[in-house]
């Protein structure tokens, strides 16, 4: 019985090796050109151009290359203006706010634009910084609000602002 078991093991190993050779050896027998340019120009580039680039015939441009998630790049927000303003504020009372107005030159009507502002020297937890429109359509306010239980005197701060316009 030991001999029969040994022959079964040898037969099983032989079958396993044969299957392994067929699986691993088949790709090795496939057509492989002699040069990299042959592989690229004959086998890879035609598939890449049609599957991935979706190229416009006769050009090197892809169809809809300027679209992201269905949005054409002309519909992305544009920076209309940006700048800085440095202010040294008077003390702000408890649960009170103070603000100053920015009049960006040559921007026009910003009533439908997005205005973002950040400060470089306002300690976290002291005040809240935000922007809001004023009665003019060509200016905006940067506001600091103190939500603490005591008056504070914020240090001089530089505010970096940007105006974004949707087309």
Image: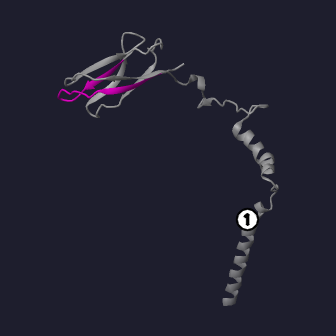
Where residue 99 sits, quadrant-wise, is: top left
Task: Using the image, determine if residue 167 lies above or below residue 58.
Answer: above
Q: Which residue has dot 1 on it?
A: 24
Q: Pinpoint residue 118: horizontal percent, then vertical percent.
A: 37, 28
Task: Using the image, determine if residue 12 lies above or below residue 5.
Answer: above
Q: Is residue 36 left or right of residue 74?
A: right
Q: Is residue 112 visible?
A: yes
Judge by depth and name the residue closer to the eye, 130 or 28.
Answer: 130
Q: Is residue 142 magenta?
A: yes
Q: Pinpoint residue 162: horizontal percent, then vertical percent.
A: 44, 24
Q: Is residue 100 magenta?
A: no
Residue drawn 30% across and 31% down? Answer: 122
Quarter placement of the N terminus: bottom right
Residue drawn 70% across and 37% down? Answer: 53
Q: Pinpoint residue 102: horizontal percent, then vertical percent.
A: 38, 16
Q: Is residue 106 left or right of residue 84?
A: right
Judge by depth and name the residue closer to the eye, 9 or 43.
Answer: 43
Q: Is residue 1 visible?
A: no
Looking at the rendering, the stretch of residues picked out in magenta corresponds to 141-163
Q: Pinpoint residue 69: horizontal percent, then vertical percent.
A: 58, 32
């Amino acid at each position: 019985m030991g001999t029969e078991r040994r022959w079964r093991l040898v037969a099983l190993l032989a079958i396993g090796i044969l299957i392994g050779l067929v699986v691993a050896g088949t790709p090795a027998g496939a057509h492989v050109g002699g040069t990299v340019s042959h592989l690229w120009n004959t086998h890879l580039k035609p598939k890449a151009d049609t599957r991935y680039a979706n190229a416009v015939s006769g050009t090197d441009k892809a169809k809809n290359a300027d679209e992201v998630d269905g949005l054409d790049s002309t519909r992305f927000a544009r920076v209309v203006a940006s700048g800085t303003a440095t202010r040294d504020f008077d003390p702000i009372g408890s649960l009170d706010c103070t603000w100053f107005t920015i009049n960006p030159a040559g921007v026009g009507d910003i009533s439908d634009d997005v205005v973002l502002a950040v400060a470089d020297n306002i300690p976290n937890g002291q005040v809240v910084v935000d922007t809001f429109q004023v009665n003019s359509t060509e200016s905006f306010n940067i506001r600091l609000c103190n939500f603490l239980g005591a008056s504070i005197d914020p240090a001089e701060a530089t505010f970096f602002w940007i105006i974004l316009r949707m087309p």
